[in-house]
Image (cartoon, rainbow, N blue to C red):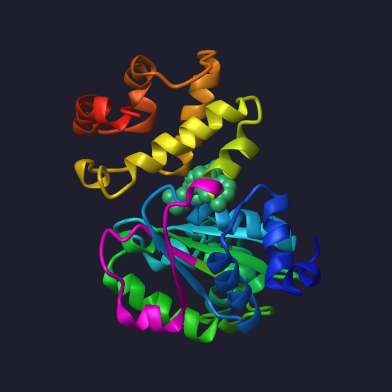
Amino acid sequence: MSELGALSSIDALSAALAQEGYFADRRLATAVFLALRLQRPLLLEGAPGVGKTELAKVLARVLQRELLRLQCFDGIEQREALYEWNHTAQLLHLRAAHDSKASEDLEREVYQDRFLIRRPLLQALQAPAPGAVLLIDEVDRADEPFEAFLLEYLGEYQVSIPELGTLRANITPITLLTSNRTRDLHDAIKRRCLFHWMDYPDLARELAIVRAQVPQASAQLSQQVADFVARLRSDSFASAFVRLPGIAESVEWTQALVALQAAQITPDLVQETSGVLFKQQEDVLRLNQLLPELIAD
Ligand SMILES: Nc1ncnc2c1ncn2[C@@H]1O[C@H](COP(=O)(O)OP(=O)(O)O)[C@@H](O)[C@H]1O
Ligand SMILES: [Mg+2]
């Protein structure tokens, strides 16, 4: 669907996302719709595996925009996010031209566009029409100075490079930030963005996702997976686990059960495949302990 079609209403946006295999609830679709309409960055916060990164990927497809992804990590620096000079190429150029030119000319030459390595934040500003979707992923992993730098970027959508001057966005990138909430983000960043807390999906939506992604699974098996995972995440059990299964785990578990030609979930099968649902030793142990209660009825 074209950008205009997807933007005409919340329903149209939901339908366009669903067409690409992404199932959003009304609240999320509204948040995305408003972010597009108001041209504001959208901050998606939530547990791992609830569909934050996937949303950006699918949105880029729906809008037929290029996806530019900045994966944040501890110690990330501006030169990895924005730009850096290609020192090797600059040196080679200097060496080749060394004898024939005045040094001021040389200095000007090495700070040309062609020696600039563009990283995602700069690429997003210079993306050709219709513009980019910019995903700033797992921003909670970056440190506070980097957050402050982001704040400036999101405020102006422009970048000043001392040797080249100020570069402004051709088209404001559609910007999504995600956080797994390993720490609280700065208030200023939150104020700059629209905010959406992403929860695990309800049963119906999880079932829809599993059915769409693992069509080989029977209706009954998919339903059992969705029920079981919902039970794990329910108030009675959630606190027993360090890290609950996300949507990715539900999908993978269904694939695993299909690969094992399982017609339905049994306690033995849950035990044998527990490493698909849980990736922490203590969680696997807890699952096995709680199994009688979990499969009780
Ligand atoms: N709403 C959704 N509709 C369809 N698939 C989804 C949805 N949410 C998550 N998924 C599936 O779950 C996987 C994990 O989601 P991801 O976006 O990586 O989670 P997060 O970034 O929140 O940790 C995705 O690859 C996708 O297959
Ligand atoms: Mg992610």
Residue 23 position, x and y percent, is 60, 53
Query: From the viewer's perspective, is 74 left or right of 286?
Result: right
* Residue bounds of the magenta highlight: 177-204
The answer to whether one can see residue 57 in this image is yes
Q: Is residue 32 magenta-colored? A: no
Q: Is residue 52 above or below residue 250?
A: below
Tell how many labels. Answer: 0
Q: Quadrant of the N terminus?
A: bottom right
Residue at the location (65% across, 25% down)? Answer: 216
Q: Residue at x 35, y 16 (%)?
A: 272
Q: Nearer the viewer, residue 34 or 147?
A: 34
x and y percentages locating residue 35 in the rendered image: 58, 76
Relative image position of residue 60 (x, y in whole percent): 66, 59
Left or right: residue 238 versus residue 207 is left
Residue 112 visible in the shown view: no
Q: At 40% across and 43% down in the image, what residue appears?
A: 230
Whether residue 193 appears in magenta in the rendering, the answer is yes
What is the quadrant of residue 275 in the picture? Answer: top left
- Relative to 86, residue 240 above or below: above
Using residue 83 as the reference point, say whether residue 22 is left or right of it. Answer: right
